[in-house]
Amino acid sequence: MLPAERVVNELKAFDARGTHALTLYLATDPSREAGANLDAQLADLLRPVEERLVGLASPRQALDADVAAVRKYLSGLEALPRGLAIFSCRARGFFRALPSAVRFRPGVSWGEHFDLRSLVTTVAEHGRVLVVLLDKERARFFRVMLEEIEEFEELWDYVPRKRRQAEYGSDARLQREHEMHVLAHVRHTVDALARLDAREPVRRVLVGGPAEVMGTFMKLLPKHLRPRVHPAIHVPLCSTPARVLDVVRDVNRTLERDSEERLVAEMLSESAGHAALGVRAVVDAVNEKRARTLVLAERAHLPGGECGRCSVIFADPVPSICPACGEPLEWLPDILPVLAEAVLRQDGQVLELHDVAGRTLLLHGGVATRLRYARPARLSA
């Protein structure tokens, strides 16, 4: 399991109820102004939180402890990454930091929940991608995630040299032998890909190679893999990992935006019971544990509230008392992080949409979800 996936799983399992937890997303790229002065960036992010805690001794002490842990971590970094996500709850002895080659939009959260929205949407967009480059006798396998690439496997198969037609004469045996060895190599590569996906499932496979090899490769793919395989990489087999990453970055961005637009179109056209659109419908689905894939428009913010006792989430306007348990409710300027955490705890997915897909979703409240099951119809009296 890659570090980012491990951190996300730990954060999903963490419960900060009864105390507070600090979430920080920092732009640490030293080539940018914000990254060149982390102290100023950190102070700017924390100022609104500190102002809310004026006169509250116990919460302020807890925040100071978390900030001290953050500063200690930052002082120990030998080299700054492009982005950094930090999650601290010293009251529970919990601290996790995730350096990333992908920039995070600076942000802070201080509450009973870690704000996982930026992390999980970044992991979703730059999630694990498998890259396969092959020719007639060799195949290279790369793992890409969060703008980092790792070459982890290489296959070689013996293939007799293909001769010119004049060299074969009337005997086509050598030609067939060459073709059979190429077929065996491609099948070997496909089998290796299937085993890798069974062991470490990936959301997307990018493949590149000569046209005559790619045609055979796509035909031999198992049916369950075909929707995730894209023959879209055009680099020589001998390319360096850095060159492969450059191409993957562009291809992946294009495929991701196309996928987002298809997702929104499908959700808008799905019949009732398969998707929920709009704030109230989505909040109801999350409260009823029916949300399977939560979809958020980039930069969307939705005010609301949450019950600290029974975890019921409310869209604005928020009642003063929870109708389920009678607990006073806390108003929140943005309930999207709370919705995201709830869906993740229910083993769902969270996706953030950009560009055309994000703007389209904003026309429908900025939030939607695919459902695990339809709400049972109520029987009339």
Image (cartoon, grey):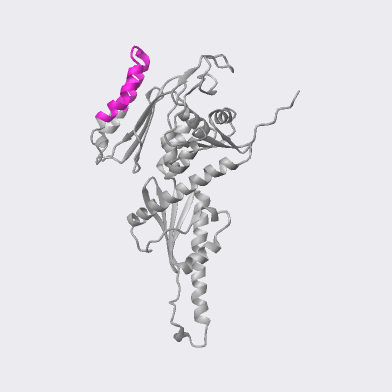
Q: Which quadrant would the C terminus be assigned to in this image?
A: top right
Q: Is residue 375 visible?
A: yes
**Which residue is found at the position 49% from the left and 88% from the top?**
169
Q: Is residue 143 magenta?
A: no
Name the residue nearer the viewer: 30 or 57.
Answer: 30
Most common secondary structure along the magenta stretch: helix
Above or below 77: residue 236: below
Kindly indicate the quadrant of the structure image that contains residue 135: bottom left
The picture places residue 170, in percent across and down from the top left corner, at 52, 88
Magenta stretch?
A: 40-69
Q: State the residue at coordinates (47%, 24%).
A: 303
Q: Is residue 62 magenta?
A: yes
In the picture provided, is 207 more to the left or to the right than 276? left
* Frontmost residue, 301 versus 196: 301
Residue 11: image location, x then y, percent: 44, 32
Q: Please name whichever residue, 181 or 146, is drawn nearer the observer in this view of the structure.
A: 146
Q: Position of residue 104 (x, y in %)?
A: 35, 37
Looking at the picture, tell me which residue is in the foreground, 147 or 105.
105
Q: Seen in the image, is 98 located left or right of residue 323?
A: left
